[in-house]
Image (tube, rainbow, N blue to C red):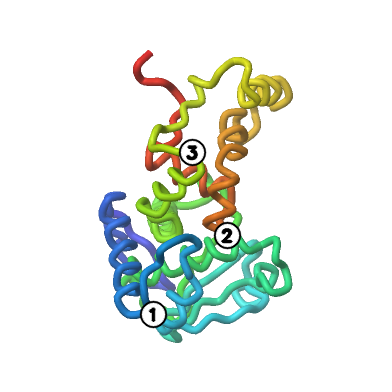
Amino acid sequence: MSTWASGKTERTVPYLPAREIERRAMALLADYERRHGPVKEPPVPIDEILELHLGLQLEFGDLRERLGRPGVLGALLTNERCVAIDGHLDPNTHPRQEARYRFTLAHEVGHWVLHRHLQGATLVELATEHTSHSGRSRERQRIEVQANLFASCLLMPRLLVRQVWRDIRGGDSPFCIDAVDERSSYATLRAVLRSVLSPYDERGPDDVLLEHFSRPFAVRFQVSAEAMRIRLEQLQLVIRADRRR
C-alpha cells in the first residue's frame, strides 16, 4: 500500500490493477449511456459526463496563481464538486489544445471516481502537471498513473477503438512495426528517424513512428497521437516486435 498526503493528513492510496481501473471507467460510461443514450462512435462526450452526468462544475482560470504552482493543467476540488482547468487549455480560445483539454478532463474525472474518498482537504492537490516521474514521490506517481489509465480507458473504450480500427484498417490484424515491408513509407520513415534522433531523446524513433501511424485514430477520438499510441499498444493492436520470430 502507498500513502498520499492531503494537507497534513496521510491518506492510503491502494494498488488498483489495470483491469479494475478499466472496469470502473467502463461502468461510468455504461451508466452515462443508460441515462443519456448510447455512445455509438467517438469522440466520447467527456464534457457531458463531467457536468451533466456527474454533476461536477467546470471552470477555467489561472491555476498557477490559484495553486501557487507552475505547470498545473487541472485540479479537482472535491468539497466544491468542481474541476478547475487552466485557461490556456480552454478549447474555445485555444482550439489546438482540444486533445489535451479532453484528456485533462478525463484525468480529473478519474480522480473523482477513484480517489475522492481519500481526500480530506477542500482543494485536492491532484493535478495534471508538467512534472517528470523522477520528480514525483512513488505515492504521487501511483495516483497519477491510475488517473491517466482511467482517462485513457474512458476516452478510448476498447470496443470503440476496435470498431474504428476495423473501419480504418479493414480488419482486426495488429500493426507490427518489425513486420513492415522494407519498401514501405513506414520503413523509410523509421530509417530517417533513427538517423536524426538522438539516443538521449525521451521518445525513440519507434515512438515517433507509431504516433505518426496513430494519428488518424487520434483525430477520431480527439486525443493526442501519443495517448492514442499508448492505448493501441495497451490493446495490442500495435506491437513493436513480431513474437513469432
Q: Nearer the viewer, mark 2 or mark 3?
A: 3
Question: SS at mark 1?
Answer: loop
Which numbered marker is on residue 54?
A: 1
In the image, residue 10 sits, relative to residue 231, either above or below, namely below
Query: Is 186 left or right of 56, judged from the image as shown?
Result: right
Snapshot quadrant of residue 16: bottom left
Q: Is residue 49 left or right of residue 3?
A: right
Residue 169 falls left or right of residue 153? right
Q: Secondary structure at mark 2?
A: strand
The local crowd at label 3, few if under 14, some if 14 to 19, many if 20 or more residues have their Cα within 10 Å, is few
Q: Which mark is residue 165?
A: none
Q: Residue at x 46, y 49 (%)?
A: 164
N-terminal of the pair, mark 3 or mark 1, is: 1
Residue 10 visible here: no
For marks 2 and 3, give the CA distance.
Answer: 34 Å
Q: Which residue is mark 2?
A: 129
